[in-house]
Amino acid sequence: MSLSQNQLNRSRDLALQLTDRQRRILKAIVETYIAEAEPVGSKSLLASQNWQISSATVRKEMADLENAGFLEQPHTSAGRVPTDLGYRVYVDDLLTPYQLQAAERASLHSFLDENLRELESTLRAAAHSLSVVTGLTAMVLLPQYEASELRHLHLILIEAGRALCVMVLSSGIVKDFLLELAPTLGKEEVEALAKALEEGLAGQRLSEISAEEIASSLFLLQLEDGQAEQVVKAVMSGIQAAQNLEIYVEGEHLLLQQPEFQDPERANLTFSEFRNPGGLLTYLEPHEESLLPLVKIGQELAFAGLSDLSLIAANYSKGNNLRGQIAVIGPRRMAYSSIISKIKYLQQSLSRSRPELAKEDLDVEEEA
């Protein structure tokens, strides 16, 4: 069912008028469909619930929910499945918060604890762990570095004419790139070059470093003609590259294992849009200052090829200036409560002063 925004707004108003029984039935249908990926009928619903109501009553309520736009019937004689609106009401009003088990917290902890030395390694581990514990595709948007300050700059001579430039940024972020140099420069000259660049640029935000400032840092070195210009261009290029958006994707293949994407044509349409950098990245910009997860369901993603998917994303922050985002992508029939809890746990972990999980958190959970 494809709903316009106006239809969604009107239907959300109708959701406020649902009876307690209708809310229980809608919640049960959504959770049964999430678990089984099969249309839910009145008989199977009654068999799984401890309700003191007749099958006829359940069928009537399901028909009313369908007429109101919360359910749909894939084909005649089949049970019902949730619509985008049904999922939306479930996420906003009916979802029971999921409590992470000690084993799940420990699993996330073990993935992250091995990668504490460098933030980017930790974020790769976060994407991998989130994909593993949800069984779905996970994405981590690296922090945007333009507000990050340069702390240290090192040059490591690899061979004549080539050096590795290592920049250490705020919050321990490390960026490196190859620097082409004049082949006549030896180890001592390269070390002097690194010292001059660090003294001239350290403490400045990447977005504020200009080519003129880089050239000024090199002024006292009295480099030969063309050498200074070569270094300025290379360092400026490296700084600009450090500010580009980077995103880690883990478990992309897991979408193909979902029943919704067994049809090759449907899977091809979804994956074509999924890989379009202008598509999902639209939703992976850190949203406002909210710590609450962002949930986009089906048609709310506004791209035709993504209408079978849902996205759950949350901001994380490093210090005062760096913000990125973590997200899970999966079928609309995803375990929203569990996934939201796992994303919030990683969000809190990544947003600490060091990307680590507190041992006391695990101890408390194990005692509970």
Image (tube, grey):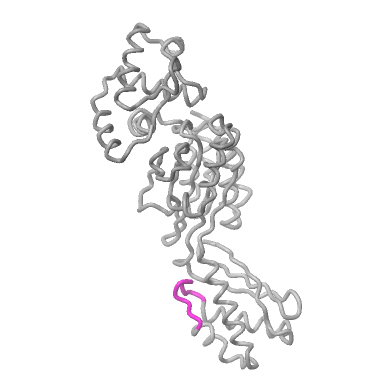
In the rendered image, the residue lying farthest to the right is: 159
**Looking at the image, which residue is at 56% across and 46% down?**
127
Q: Where is residue 325 in the image (x, y as percent from the top left)?
A: 47, 51
With respect to residue 330, does 165 lie above or below?
Answer: below
Find out whether residue 320 is within the magenta segment: no
Q: In which quarter of the image is the N terminus?
A: top left
Q: Nearer the viewer, residue 264 or 352?
A: 264
Q: Where is residue 311 in the image (x, y as percent from the top left)?
A: 45, 41
The reply to whether residue 344 is in sight is no
Magenta stretch, main secondary structure class:
loop
Residue at the location (54% across, 58% down)? 246
Q: In this view, does 320 lie above or below 361?
A: below
- Which residue: 70% across, 85% down? 182
- Residue 142, position in %: x, y? 52, 56
Q: Which residue is drawn at 46% across and 34% down?
A: 332
- Nearer to the camera, 235 or 107: 235
Q: Is residue 203 above or below residue 25?
A: below
Please give left or right for residue 317 compared with residue 8 in the image: right
Q: Total of numbered circles in the picture?
A: 0
Closer-to-camera residue (77/203): 77
Query: How far across and how far down the image is residue 79, in percent?
Result: 44, 17
Task: Decide: is 263 above or below 188.
Answer: above
* Residue 207 highlighted magenta (yes or no): yes
The segment highlighted magenta reads: 202-211
